[in-house]
Image (tube, helix red, strand yellow):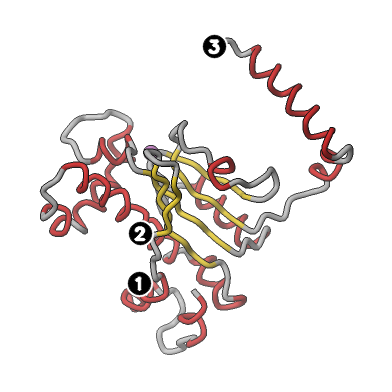
Amino acid sequence: MDTSRIFENNKRWIAERLALDPDYFKKLAEGQSPEFLYIGCSDSRVSAEELMGLQPGEVFVHRNIANQVVATDNNINSVIQFAVERLRVKHIIVCGHYECGGVRAAMTQSDMGQLNSWLQNLRDVYRLHRHELNDIKDDRKRYDRLVELNVLEQCMNIIKIDHVQRSWSKSGYPKLYGWVFDLRTGRLIDLQLDMGKEFREVRAIYDLKPLNKPDQDQERRI
Ligand code: CO
């Protein structure tokens, strides 16, 4: 495919938008106040806005290989901080997907060069949950389960972030959600993670507030 097709698409898209609302781009240029931060995989088959049925301006998006939240990644840290402190998003969604190549690569013993350090985080997720995963004899089911556990662990990584914890103390937001996109069916699945419970279990380790000043409300609000 030639890139000229993309510019043709763009012209058509502008015409479609203006036909619906002549002020569409004027309004778009005025600013953004999305309620959602979506953290998903870079996979070309998993497009954030399209699968959620959301329009430009409705979701702040970060994508990387296998939807990782890495403490030393300045990129995602900046995205989360901006979304929480400036945009004041109400909801943070970590969305994995079945058939994820990054997750698959982390399940195999292969040297991936530059990707090795990135995939090491996924191997750590496997190690944390290896007993559950190794009990699953069916390859496909074990692979699917690692996709889900990876979403859980990336939500856990968001819990650990100082400005997220500060925002919970102040406003009770953002709420956290773990989802999986099943690209075999197109269905979006809510893993129904209880992040309040997860946080309570590890709070003594990750809570950045002094432990002698517990904020009871914080547990409720997550
Ligand atoms: Co993927």
Tell me, yes or no, whether the two marked residues, 1 and 3, touch with CB atoms within 8 Å.
Answer: no
Q: Do tag 2 and tag 1 residues touch (Cβ < 8 Å)?
A: yes
Task: Where is residue 206? Give x, y as percent.
Answer: 37, 71
Which numbered tag is attached to residue 1?
A: 3
Work out whether residue 17 or residue 27 is closer to the camera in this orientation and state it.
17
Amino acid tagged 1: Glu
Q: Is residue 31 left or right of residue 191?
A: right
Q: Give the mark, 2 or 3, whose residue is nearer the N terminus.
A: 3
Task: Give the residue pinned by disc 1.
Answer: 198
- Gap in angstroms between the C-alphas marked 1 and 3: 46 Å
Residue 176: image x %, image y %? Answer: 48, 64
**Relative to 13, 221 lies left or right:** left
Q: Nearer the viewer, mark 1 or mark 3?
A: 3
Q: Secondary structure at mark 1?
A: helix
Q: Quadrant of the N terminus?
A: top right
Q: Locate residue 74, reporting x and y percent.
A: 49, 47
Task: Indicate the position of residue 26 as horizontal and vertical percent values.
Answer: 86, 41
> Which residue is denoted by mark 2 in the rendering?
152
First reached walking from the N terminus: tag 2 or tag 1: 2
Name the kind of residue labelled 2 in the image. Leu
Distance of mark 2 from mark 1, alpha carbons?
A: 9 Å
Which residue is depicted at the point 49% across and 67% down? 162
Q: Which residue is at the far front?
A: 185
Mark 2–mark 3 CB contact (< 8 Å): no
Q: Nearer the viewer, mark 2 or mark 3?
A: 3
**Eyeballing the image, is 201 above or below 182?**
below
Dot 3 amino acid type: Met
Q: Quadrant of ligand 1?
A: top left
Q: Residues within 10 Å of mark 1 (few under 14, many from 20)?
A: some
Count of numbered labels shown in the rendering = 3
